Image (tube, helix red, strand yellow):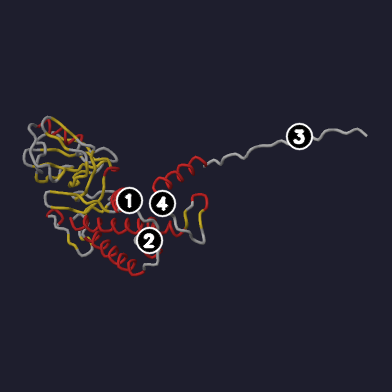
Amino acid sequence: MILRPLPRPVFEPPRAGALRGAWNVWYAFLRRTHLRVPSAPISIKPIGLTWQSVAVVLIPAYGWAALGKSSYFRWAALMYGACAVIAVLCLGWPAAGWAAGVMITLHGLGIAEYFYSGRLWPQPTHRVGRYVGVVLALAFVYTIASRRVLATVVIPLHTDRGVLLIDAWTRPNPVERDAIVAFRTRGWQAGGFRLPAGVYLGRAIGQPGDVVTFHADTFTVNGRAYPRRSSMPRHGGLTVPERNTFVWPLELGREFRNEGEAADFARKAALVDDANLVGRPYRRWFLRQQHYEPLR
């Protein structure tokens, strides 16, 4: 009988997961900040979070409810809801900014109270610093989110007569002639006149294919005369190209120094691409009547 040696077992050490580096960064963050994540029956084990802690981050003031402080949660939720209503109704006014600040503070304090409630620091400033850090981080998130929402739904436009709210949800397409519209421009400069980039309010004068001609006291659109607008050229003309609208701003604030600047502005800045038409002003924002003379 011939004895043969058994084959040597092939040993392969366990390999690190694809997200191992990300987990190392996460756990280093936990060790650095002394962050304590309370346990819950259902957990997301790879990152040490719980469904309850995720709810605390997403739901304002829920941190107190998760800790069993129901009275704190009720009062904080009530204040948050009231401030949310004020922020929406008073959009564009200073009161909306104050209300948003209270909302951010309540949301941030609820998160900080939940994650840092189980640890006592020998120096109170350490705990206060962490609370302030959470509120500041949340303020950054609120700022980014609010800008996204405002750019999609409503845009507060600052004019010489106050704040005007623009309906950015229902964009006018096509634009009716003589309608008040808000448009976006990349900016324009000629000589001593400069129009910064931003959103402006103007009156739609010409549609695609219309022939606009300027005169000393009037201007014509396809032969029909209208009173000359402030700062318009006094001679010359143009034809509105496709997918463009001729919009003359309502508040330029000054006359051009010469006809060359006015004509250049009419050709370059007043011809607005349809993609840059933002929307029309709201006539009423909930209980708030918008006061702007050209809308009446």
Q: Which residue is mark 1?
A: 130
Location of residue 23 in the rendering, given as x and y in whole percent from the top left corner: 49, 44
| Amino acid carrying mark 4 in the image | Leu
Location of residue 262 in the rendering, given as x and y in whole percent from the top left corner: 12, 34
- Please say if the residues under marks 4 and 1 sit with CB atoms less than 8 Å apart: no
Q: Nearer the viewer, residue 183 or 16?
A: 16
Q: What distance separates the C-alpha of mark 2 from that of mark 1?
A: 16 Å
Q: Earlier in the sequence, mark 3 or mark 1?
A: 3
Q: What distance separates the C-alpha of mark 2 from that of mark 3?
A: 57 Å
Q: Which residue is mark 4?
A: 35
Location of residue 54 in the rendering, given as x and y in whole percent from the top left corner: 43, 56
Residue positioned most to the front: 122
Q: Which quarter of the figure is the C terminus placed in?
A: bottom left
Q: Residues within 10 Å of mark 4 (few under 14, many from 20)?
A: some
Q: Nearer the viewer, mark 4 or mark 2?
A: 4
- Please say if the residues under marks 2 and 1 sit with CB atoms less than 8 Å apart: no
Q: Earlier in the sequence, mark 2 or mark 3?
A: 3
Residue at position x 26%, y 47% in the image: 278
Q: What distance separates the C-alpha of mark 3 from that of mark 4?
A: 47 Å
